Amino acid sequence: MRALVRGRSLVSSRVAVVEVTKAVARHDPSADPDPVLGQLTLIDLDPELARAAAAIGGYQLRALDAIHVASAVRVATDLEAFVTYDARQAAAALAVGLRVLMPTGDATP
């Protein structure tokens, strides 16, 4: 993942603040998530984005995953790729026309 994103501008939904903080704490409770979060440009969840996320990926896509995909769609013209480890999220992103990269390989057909 580090090699994949090194030197690039990173964008995520504001829900990443919660997700990254929790993930860092699970890995190392004494670690500070702010250096990672400081690298992200965050997209706020507003009513329009919430409606878009609700319409993405069908019922099987988890809510936070849908928010991330909808956030990416919002900035799609400036987006090189959507990066994820999650196959369902990758499928939803592909379905809305995003180029998807998974650290284990390129998910874009």
Image (cartoon, rainbow, N blue to C red):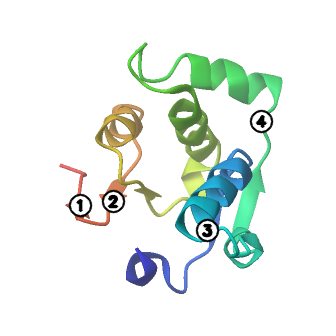
User: CB of mark 1 within 8 Å of CB of mark 2?
Assistant: yes
In the image, which disc is placed on residue 106? 1
User: CB of mark 4 within 8 Å of CB of mark 1?
Assistant: no
Tell me the quarter of the picture where residue 53 sits. top right
Tell me the quarter of the picture where residue 55 sits. top right
Q: Earlier in the sequence, mark 1 or mark 2?
A: 2
Q: Nearer the viewer, residue 20 or 103?
A: 20
Q: Earlier in the sequence, mark 1 or mark 3?
A: 3
User: CB of mark 3 within 8 Å of CB of mark 4?
Assistant: no
The amino acid on which the numbered mark 4 sits, given as a three-letter code, is Leu
Q: Is residue 36 above or below residue 56?
A: below
SS type, badge 1:
strand
In the image, which disc is placed on residue 15? none
Q: Which residue in the structure is indicated by mark 2?
A: 101
Neighbor class of circle 2 (other Cα within 10 Å; few <14, some 14-19, many 20+) is: some
Q: Earlier in the sequence, mark 3 or mark 4?
A: 3
Q: Which residue in the structure is indicated by mark 3?
A: 10
Looking at the picture, how far across and down is residue 48, in whole percent?
76, 24
Picture residue at 58% right of the left edge, 34% below the top: 64
Whole-number angstrom distance, CA of label 3 to CA of label 4: 17 Å
Q: Is residue 56 above or below residue 38?
A: above
Whole-number angstrom distance, CA of label 1 to CA of label 2: 5 Å
Neighbor class of circle 4 (other Cα within 10 Å; few <14, some 14-19, many 20+) is: some
Which residue in the rendered view is the most extreme toward the left?
Answer: 109
The reply, left or right, for residue 91 in relation to residue 56 is: left
The amino acid on which the numbered mark 3 sits, given as a three-letter code, is Leu
